[in-house]
Image (spheres, rainbow, N blue to C red):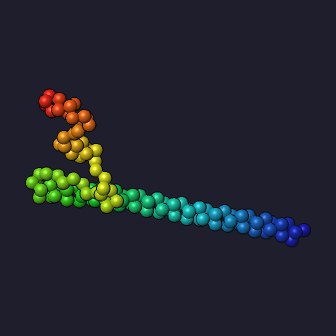
Amino acid sequence: MFAFIRSLFTKSINSIIADITKKIEHLHIVAELHAAESVVQTAIAKEATAARLFADTEYSRAKSIAGKLTAQNGGRQEPAARPSHQAPLTSLVLTEVMMSSVPRKMSSSPRIEASVQKAL
């Protein structure tokens, strides 16, 4: 009878040890996952910081170049260069300025045109 009880007791202890071992393995896996997550979050934060620094540097560099170009042009700012596919486009402001410097033909009738010229 002692052998039977001892056998049950041993099986119970072995079962408990196996369960505890599985739980410990699970805890190790969870801990490793948390550590990996922390590493990933740190890497993402570093990448974001690097991207911000790069953008700030590029902005400062572009601003410096624009300042140098303005200084070289005697304080005048050059109009922004257009990409080649936009070269034929003219801004509305420039179109208005160009049109205002050209006399307009008001009418096809010479009498009306003459009276307009007199009024000016």
Residue 80 percent location from the top left of the image: 24, 54
Q: Nearer the viewer, residue 14 or 109?
A: 109
Residue 53 visible at all: no
Residue 75 percent location from the top left of the image: 11, 51
Identity of the residue drawn at 28% across and 59% down: 58
Residue 65 percent location from the top left of the image: 19, 59
Q: Which corner quadrant of the image does residue 109 belong to?
A: top left
Q: Is residue 58 left or right of residue 118?
A: right
Identity of the residue drawn at 54% across and 60% down: 34
Residue 25 visible at all: yes
Residue 6 percent location from the top left of the image: 83, 69
Q: Nearer the viewer, residue 13 or 73?
A: 73
Q: Which corner quadrant of the image does residue 84 belong to?
A: bottom left
Identity of the residue drawn at 87% across and 69% down: 4
Q: Is residue 15 left or right of residue 78?
A: right
Identity of the residue drawn at 17% across and 32% down: 114
